[in-house]
Image (spheres, rainbow, N blue to C red):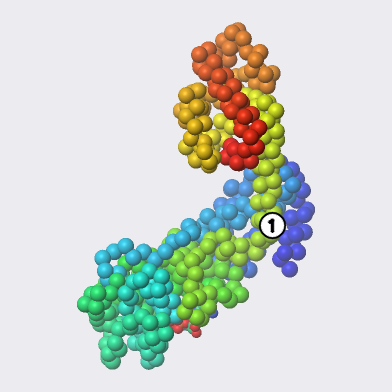
Amino acid sequence: NLQERLGAILNNLTGRGALSEADVAAALREVRRALIEADVALDVVRSFTERVREKAVGAEVLKSVKPGQMVVKIVHDELVEMLGAEGETIDLNAPAPVVLMMVGLQGSGKTTTTGKIARRLSERQGKKVLMASLDTRRPAAQEQLRQIGEQVSVATLPIVAGQSPVDIAKRAVQAARLGGHDVVILDTAGRTHIDEPLMAEMADIKRVANPHEILLVADSLTGQDAVNLARSFDERVGITGLVLTRMDGDGRGGAALSMRAVTGKPIKLIGTGEKMDALEEFHPRRIADRILGMGDIVSLVEKAAETIDQEKAAAMAKKMQAGKFDLNDLAEQLQQMQKMGGMGGIMGLMPGMGKMKDQLAAAGLNDKTFARQIAIIRSMTPQERANPDILKNSRKKRIAAGSGTDAAQINKLLKMHRQMADMMKAMGGKGRKGGMMRGLM
Ligand code: GDP
Ligand code: MG
């Protein structure tokens, strides 16, 4: 099985340091298989693995992690990124009545999802919702929605025989306006496959109803057709988001990635059952785990990264407590601060750091001076960095020349370092190094 095959491959890659082309290629072969087994469309698999290859080759392998495992983590992160943001919701930011239009193939779950969304909006957000079935093709379709409406206590548009979908859409919007509804949800008819009459009908409805959201409802078990499906609806009707149904089934959810990749539209909700409360927010991480099926490896790599951070932090804390915070450590901290978006970023992470921030600013540490300060430290010899006390005037002149600064700036840096070292020693003594270090690392 896949896990075993992967296990073997991953264990065979034992190189250290940066990931080589060969490491990445070997691991990606297995990843590609996992994606295909999860029903991700072939085109998407291809472009996705190419992106991963570019990111992975040359990437550092964490200590205690195998190259193959590192690649899996990179793949996972890329999947999460591609699946898109967490917490996308239905956008109701428009004048009432806000029109939502549900589109998709027959049996994809449009009518059920219409009921679920209506229930959620009315129960959780206190919205006054009206639902209307535009499915005139199946005789029982409008009755199905009416029953769902009763079940979730949401109004449905009265059924009038003989009207076209476009007529019903107009009537629904009109009724919602007159009835003071906040939201009107149009549940359209599907077909067993995409065809021109279906697309034309959707386009007509869109024209008369002017929907604020057009949600493509798709079965998460859709395989290679997912790309074609999403592309057709998006090109012809223009969707604003995706709802994936049957995520409670045993599918691996590859359709999510495929449809997201071709449309770039957010996955807004997922259906997880037949019941009216089986509607959930979309969590890219969970879906990524499911598509890749290698959650254990991902958490293993995350643990390893955490351990390394903790080891570094502990080592640094020890040095600080012993009053041995040298200029090498300062340079590392400055680089960290630069990475984290400057003082604002790092200080924001440290509780009660306002005072320290002021002190550091007074000592000359601010976002603009990071680069200069790092340059000064780089112009020092290792002995000077480890023991700044040996810095006399002649050495300072050399460093000033090397870093394009002057003696005054070097003195400022040295003063700041002394202040920081003192502060850290004091804080370490008070047993606050945990919180402090977490912030600093
Ligand atoms: P429509 O033709 O697109 O309107 O599809 P329906 O809403 O009528 O749903 C077709 C079938 O799928 C029904 O039996 C639903 O109960 C079922 N269904 C819809 N969404 C889900 C879901 O998220 N999970 C499961 N297990 N079944 C679902
Ligand atoms: Mg239906």
The picture quadrant where one finds residue 32 is: bottom right
Query: Which quadrant is home to the N terminus?
Result: bottom right
- Of 261 and 273, nearer the camera is 273
Above or below for 249 versus 341: below
Query: Does the rendering let one see residue 105?
Result: no
In the image, residue 422 sits, relative to residue 306, either above or below, namely above
Residue 25 in picture, x, y percent from top left? 67, 52
Q: Please, what is the three-letter code of the amino acid marked with disc 1? A: Ile
- Residue at the spot 66% in from the left edge and 32% down from the top edge: 429
- In the displayed structure, 84 sits above or below 160; it is above
Left or right of 209? Residue 376 is right
The C terminus sits in image quarter: top right
Residue at image coords 38%, 82%: 153
Q: Which residue is mark 1?
A: 297
Residue at (61%, 25%) from the top-left corner? 422
Q: Position of residue 327 (x, y in %)?
A: 62, 24
Count of numbered circles on the image: 1
Question: Mark 1: is the Cβ under 8 angstroms from ligand 1?
Answer: no
* Image position of 346 with respect to 262: above or below: above
**Which residue corresponds to the image point at 32% horizontal and 62% vertical from the top-left?**
93
**Farthest residue in the top direction?**
394
Q: Is residue 342 left or right of residue 45?
A: left
On the rendered structure, is 77 left or right of 271?
right
Among the 4 quarters of the image, the one containing residue 418: top right
- Nearest the viewer among 408 and 284 is 408
Neighbourhood count class around disc 1 (C-alpha, 10 Å): few under 14, some 14–19, many 20 upward: some
Label 1 element class: helix
Residue 249 on image: x %, y %: 58, 76
- One can see residue 385 in this view: yes
Q: Position of residue 235 (x, y in %)?
A: 38, 66
